[in-house]
Image (cartoon, rainbow, N blue to C red):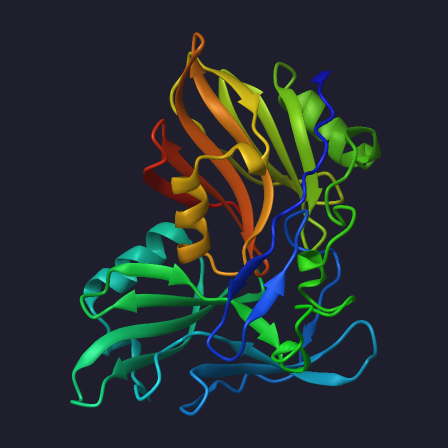
Amino acid sequence: MKTKVIYPTLLLFAMFGILSSCQKDAASTSSKTTSTTTTATITARTLTGSIVLASVDTASSGKKDTLFLVNCFKPHSKPDSVAFSALPTAIGTYLTANYSGYTFKKAFKITDTTKTVTGYVVIIKYNGNFVGLKFDASGNFVSVLEQMMGQDINNPQGSHPGGPFDDRQGGPAKDTIALLAIPSAVLTYFDTTYPTDTLLHASITPDSTYLLISKNGVLYATNISVAGKLISRIQVGPPAPLNVKSVTQANLLSAITTYLTATYPGYVFNKAFADLNGSTIIGYDVFITANSSNYIVHFDASGNFVKAITLH
C-alpha cells in the first residue's frame, strides 16, 4: 500500500444562528464522542425558530440536555406538523437518493403571516443520528440544518467540550487519525481488498466506523467497521484518468466557502482535494461533516456546486 499522511487543517470561525450569534471553530469531521438518544420527542418552538429533537445524555457530565435544530424558520413564521404523504414528491425523491436507508421521523410545513407555505423542515434518522433538512415550498433542497445542545444556545464559544459536536471546538482534529493508527483488522481488509489504492486520509465516525479516503484513478471513500468488515465503498471523484492534490481550507475558492456556509451551517471542514487534468484544475472535492453525518461536496473549477454525496 502506498500511503501519504495528510495533516488536518483548522476551520475559520463562522457566524450564524437564529437563536443567537454562535461561533464554531473546527478541525475535523464528526467527533468520536457520541450521545445516546433517550427520547424521540420532536416538537416545534415558534418563538425561537428552533425545533426540539430529543433529550440526550451528554458524555461529559452524564446529565440530560435537549438537542435542537436551529434556524428552521424565520421570525413570525409558523411550523405545523405534516404527514410524509403531504410533502412534495421532490422531497421523498431527494431523501431516497441522498440518504439511502433513512428512517422518517417528522416533518413540518412552514407558513408565513399570510398562511402561505414557504418551505418544509424534514427530520430523519440516518446511521443512528438525527438529520434535519430544509426544503423550499416546491420541495427543492435548501440546506442541512445545524444542531445544537440546549446549553450551547447562548454560549459564545459554541459547542461545549465533550458534547456530541465537540469537533467544532478548536485544537487537534479529534477524529482524524494517522494512517499508522488504523486498527489492524481495518487496514488488513483494506490492503487485501484494494491493494492498488493509495490511502490519503483516515477518520473515525461517532459509531466507530473508519472512513478511509483513497485514490485509485479516482477518489474513493470506504467505510469499514472496527472488526474489519466492509460497510460501503463510494466512488467520490470524477471519472479517470485523474490526478489529485490536497488543498487547505484557506486556499479554497470563496465561492466554495460561501456555498458550504449557506448549505451546511456549522459544518466542520475535514479535507479537500483539487482534481487535475494534467496540471489544470477541473474541480474540487471537499469532505465535511454537518452534525454527525459525513459528506463530500463537488465543485467545478470555478467553485460552482456540482453535487453532494452522503458518505456515512
Q: Considering depth in this image, is 4 or 16 the residue closer to the camera?
A: 16
* Res. 236 in view: no
- Most foreground residue, 148 or 249: 249
Does 217 sit left or right of 173 as displayed? left
> What's the residue at 61%, 49% (across, down)?
12
At a point 49% along the width and 71% down the height, the residue shown is 17
Position of 76 relative to 128 (above/below): below
Q: Splitting the image into 4 quarters, where does residue 32 fall? A: bottom right
| Residue located 35% across and 41% down the image | 307
Residue 46 lies, in percent from the top left, at 40, 91
Q: Quadrant of residue 103?
A: bottom left
Q: Nearer the viewer, residue 161 or 90?
A: 161
Is 249 situated above or below 69?
above
Labels in figure, total? 0
Q: Is residue 160 above or below residue 98?
A: below
Q: Do we see residue 300 in this rendering? A: yes
Q: Position of residue 228 (x, y in %)?
A: 73, 38
Residue 94 place in picture, x, y as percent: 30, 56
Is residue 212 toward the left or the right of residue 122 in the image?
right
Q: Relative to the observer, which residue lies in front, 232 or 257?
A: 257
Q: In the image, what residue occupies the spot 43% across and 92% down?
A: 47
How far from the left and from the top, in percent, is residue 1?
A: 72, 16
Q: In the current view of this chain or complex, which residue is farthest to the top?
A: 278
On the rendered structure, is 298 left or right of 233?
left
- Establish if 216 lies above or below 166: above
